Image (cartoon, helix red, strand yellow):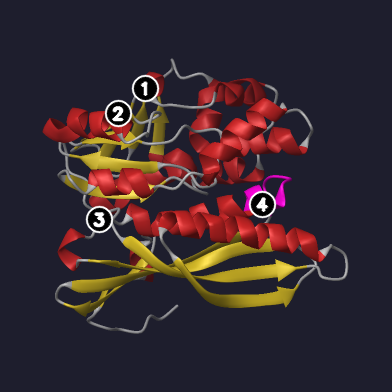
């Protein structure tokens, strides 16, 4: 598809970054993103919170501050009670309020399948922008949320996940990436992306590709929900996981010690996942310590960036 050239576009469609970035002045750029999807949990209010947190995350991943949002709603008005929509919107606006974001309006259509999300506008200083293409050899990789939400949500749809597990995963997905974004901006961070539909290995592969580096991930260091191991072994793997494996497998090499269930967790499509931060090695431990003090308890150093082989990831 031919793109419209504009010298003020800092990050556009060609970079496959988390959001688009447009320079307004030498000291000010806007970040724009949009995301919406079908329900992944049963509770409408929780769904609204998760969808809002997921959309806001793209701005946080680029070191920006989200300012405004607009609702995107597809709702089967003839087949679903309007109270469901009210609860979804209430969840979304509560999450926006927590983020300090102003809702300006939105758009809705009558659709056979329920969907909800946001378009979000934020700001960033062009020189403080963080992208998915700046990782440097020697950097440490920090992940701020555990993996496995796609697998567990699939088990939930089958009625196999306990209420305790559902509550724990829902809380994680609904949590904002605001705190880790603000903390990372205090350090020498070279690249960042949020872990969503492409799974950990998909997003890592994109960082490796656009940064022209290699990545080594340590399977024993990666945080994940323990329940995801059980459900992966039982075959509760979502379609997004299989698509990620099919598309990204050629870019990834697993050591013989990596169990199959961990391969599933690494490819698992996430909803409102954590930030993956590529930080200078001398700052990694200090970043991790400050993240934990800010309440990001699951944050962990999961690997490092290497010079070669370029555009490949080794999981060992």
Label 4 CA crowd tier, 10 Å (few <14, some 14–19, many 20+) = some
Name the residue that disc number 4 marks. Answer: 45
Q: Position of residue 137 (x, y in %)?
A: 16, 39
What SS does tag 1 mark?
helix
Answer with mark 3 or mark 2, whichever residue precedes in sequence. 3
- Left or right of 194? Residue 225 is right
The span from disc 3 to disc 4 (Cα, nearest Å) is 32 Å
Classify 5 as above or below 314. Answer: below
Asked which quadrant contains residue 23, the reply is bottom left
Q: Position of residue 97 (x, y in %)?
A: 48, 59
The span from disc 1 to disc 2 (Cα, nearest Å) is 7 Å
Asked which quadrant contains residue 14, the reply is bottom left
Mark 1 and mark 2 in contact? Answer it, CB < 8 Å: yes
Mark 1 and mark 3 in contact? Answer it, CB < 8 Å: no
What SS does tag 2 mark?
strand
Front label number (4 vs 1): 4
Classify 57 as above or below 156. Answer: below
- Left or right of 306? Residue 294 is right
Label 3 CA crowd tier, 10 Å (few <14, some 14–19, many 20+) = many
Answer with mark 2 or mark 4, whichever residue precedes in sequence. 4
Name the residue that disc number 3 marks. Answer: 130
Mark 4 and mark 1 in contact? Answer it, CB < 8 Å: no
Answer with mark 1 or mark 2, whichever residue precedes in sequence. 1
Answer with mark 1 or mark 3, whichever residue precedes in sequence. 3
Viewer-nearest residue: 105 or 9:
105
Quarter of the picture holding the C terminus: top left
Identify the magenta region. Answer: 39-47
The span from disc 2 to disc 4 (Cα, nearest Å) is 33 Å
The span from disc 1 to disc 3 (Cα, nearest Å) is 24 Å
The span from disc 4 to disc 1 (Cα, nearest Å) is 33 Å
The mark found on residue 221 in the picture is 1
């Amino acid at each position: 598809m031919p793109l419209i050239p504009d010298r003020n576009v800092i990050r556009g469609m060609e970079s496959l970054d988390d959001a688009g970035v447009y320079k307004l002045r030498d000291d000010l750029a806007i970040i724009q993103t949009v995301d919406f999807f079908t329900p992944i949990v049963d509770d409408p209010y929780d769904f609204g919170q998760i969808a809002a947190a997921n959309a806001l995350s793209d701005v946080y991943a680029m070191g920006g501050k989200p300012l405004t949002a607009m609702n995107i709603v597809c709702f089967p008005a003839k087949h679903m009670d309007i109270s469901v929509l009210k609860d979804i919107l209430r969840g979304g606006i509560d999450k926006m309020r927590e983020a300090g974001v102003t809702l300006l309006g939105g758009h809705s259509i009558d659709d056979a399948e329920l969907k909800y999300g946001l378009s979000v506008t934020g700001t960033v200083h062009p020189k403080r922008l963080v992208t998915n293409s700046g990782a440097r050899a020697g950097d440490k990789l920090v992940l701020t949320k555990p993996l496995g939400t796609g697998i567990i949500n699939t088990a939930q749809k089958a009625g196999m996940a306990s209420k305790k597990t559902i509550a724990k995963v829902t809380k994680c997905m609904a949590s904002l990436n605001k705190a880790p974004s603000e903390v990372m901006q205090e350090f020498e961070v070279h690249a960042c992306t949020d872990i969503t539909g492409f799974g950990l290995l998909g997003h890592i592969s994109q960082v490796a590709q656009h940064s022209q580096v290699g990545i080594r991930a340590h399977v024993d260091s990666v945080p994940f929900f323990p329940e995801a191991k059980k459900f992966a072994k039982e075959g509760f793997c979502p379609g997004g996981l299989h698509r990620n494996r099919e598309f990204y497998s050629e870019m990834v090499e697993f050591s013989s010690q990596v169990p199959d269930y961990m391969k599933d967790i690494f490819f698992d499509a996430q909803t409102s996942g954590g930030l993956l931060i590529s930080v200078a090695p001398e700052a990694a431990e200090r970043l991790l310590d400050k993240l934990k003090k800010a309440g990001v308890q699951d944050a962990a150093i999961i690997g490092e960036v290497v010079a070669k082989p370029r555009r490949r990831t080794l999981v060992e």
